[in-house]
Amino acid sequence: MGFGVFVHRSDSIYDDSPAERYQFPRQYLHRAQACVGDWIVYYEPRKVAATRGYFAVATVQEIIPDPKIAGMFVARIAPGSYLDFANPVPFAGAAGPAERGVLNEEGRISGRAQAAVRPLSAEDFHRIVSLGLADVPVLPRRDQPAVPPGMSEEQAPFAFAQERDRATFTVSRIVRDRIFRRVVLRAYDQRCAMTGLRLINGGGRAEVAAAHIRPVEAGGPDIVTNGIALCGTAHWMFDRGLIGLSDDLEILISRQVNDPGAVRGLINPTGRAFPPGRLSDRPHPHFLDWHRTHCFKQ
């Protein structure tokens, strides 16, 4: 087992879904196999407009031949392991590349930086992930209810001490929920996608929630394309299947709504959800399809 880097473009020609699978050609098979059972970091190349750099981590569960295309393979991502970075990490900063393994003996960027799948040292992995998840609050906010007895989690600074099991850093539901909220609200500019309202309270906190389209309890991943920013009322209706979304983000109103006129007055006049700023952050059609099939009341 070993750490690795998987290069993924938002406009990729490959059949990728970062939280679920990563498609690659045979030439990278040996390198990908070395990552099975361990963590990889996703990286978006600098040539991509508004690149996110290193933007997420995930665990590789297994490698299988692509059942549809000969000579291609698929790295299946362990369910629940994918996590977007709260802070995308640029390829290079003031101290040089975050991934020191791409430097040659002369300290220059080598051809290794062009490989779509490449090994990553433990030192580089911890550096990148520490930057990507820096400043993530772990302790409960003062205005949040206390965690019930027996359900509390370790209240410790988010760190990568050598003695800690590196696999525990994405386990905490508290940490994952806060990162997911930060990533989704940033994508939607803290605006409710259904109503268009962008309300900030006196403490500077946005009054919208980061809703999972396919819930975590139903196998939904913590990825921005499985999220949408919603105000309280819209969130309540979405979770109960009273409103939904088509693949092109048309807002659907269930026939079981007792006051459809009021609901139409609540949603924005366009009748479509406001999309996030980045095309690659838009809700993925297969998550929307899951919500229409399993949650939305026709």
Image (tube, rainbow, N blue to C red):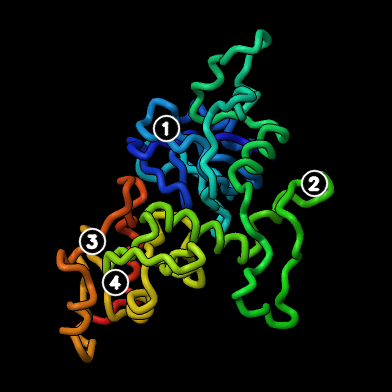
Residue behind mark 1? 71
Q: Secondary structure at mark 1?
A: loop
Q: Position of residue 96 (x, y in %)?
A: 61, 22
Give the residue drawn at x 29%, y 71%. Answer: 292
Name above or below for residue 97 compared with residue 289. above
Residue behind mark 3? 249
**Which of label 2 and label 1 is nearer to you?**
2
Whether residue 24 sits left or right of residue 94 in the image: it is left
Look at label 4 and name its amino acid: Arg
Label 1 and label 4: CA atoms lie apart by 35 Å
Residue behind mark 4? 292
Q: 190 and 69: which one is in front?
A: 190
Give the residue drawn at x 59%, y 41%. Answer: 40
Label 3 and label 1: CA atoms lie apart by 36 Å
**Which of label 4 and label 3 is nearer to you?**
3
Residue behind mark 2? 161
For residue 250, which quarter of the picture?
bottom left
Q: Position of residue 148 (x, y in %)?
A: 69, 82
Kindly give the residue lying farthest to the top in the view shown: 106
Label 4 and label 3: CA atoms lie apart by 12 Å
Q: Residues within 10 Å of mark 1 (few under 14, many from 20)?
A: few
Q: Position of residue 190 (x, y in %)?
A: 39, 59
